[in-house]
Image (tube, helix red, strand yellow):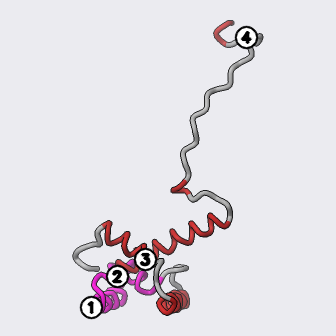
Amino acid sequence: MTETPLTREQIQAAELASQHHNYFVRVAKDFDIFVNGLADGNVGETISARCGRLEKTNEFARLLAKGLSEIQPQHCEKAEAGTLGDAEHLEAVESQALGEVPPQAAAPAPATEAPEEPADKPSLGDA
């Protein structure tokens, strides 16, 4: 892991960038996810994101993350943010297809008043 974590803006940029890859990059990323699945990784996670998540506890992941950071600074951190962006995008697409309102877009329910009791029925205060 790099000494400096990603800023909120860098995370948002990585999440957004993950949605705008060209065809070749999307196919390569899907192959990466496939290989990670063969290695018993989490569904939808790239090898880079997995290395970023595991580099503190796994020597191989730490070495791979360090090598990837030589090619692109903070590569694994950006991959983790991209995976989050992919998941959020997929959730929105599926929610729209199912006719659901995504959780972050749902408005709070309006406060309702208790229904009035009929006038001929005694209330607790009348007894």
For residue 71, side relative to residue 107 (left or right): left
Range of magenta residues: 46-74
Q: Which residue is drawn at the image coordinates 49% and 81% (left, top)?
A: 45
Label at residue 36: none
Q: Which residue is drawn at the image coordinates 30% and 88% (left, top)?
A: 72
Q: Is residue 58 above or below residue 95?
A: below
Q: Quadrant of residue 101?
A: bottom right
Q: Is residue 45 above or below residue 102?
A: below
Q: Main secondary structure of the magenta part?
A: helix
Mark before the other along the chain sequence, 3 or 4:
3
In the rendered view of the protein, which quadrant contains the N terminus?
bottom left
- Indicate the amino acid at tag 3: Gly
In the rendered view of the protein, which quadrant contains the C terminus?
top right
Q: Residue at label 3? A: 82
- Indicate the amino acid at tag 1: Glu
- Indicate the amino acid at tag 2: Glu
**Alpha carbon distance from label 3 to label 2:** 17 Å
**Alpha carbon distance from label 4 to label 2:** 69 Å
Q: Residues within 10 Å of mark 1 (few under 14, many from 20)?
A: few
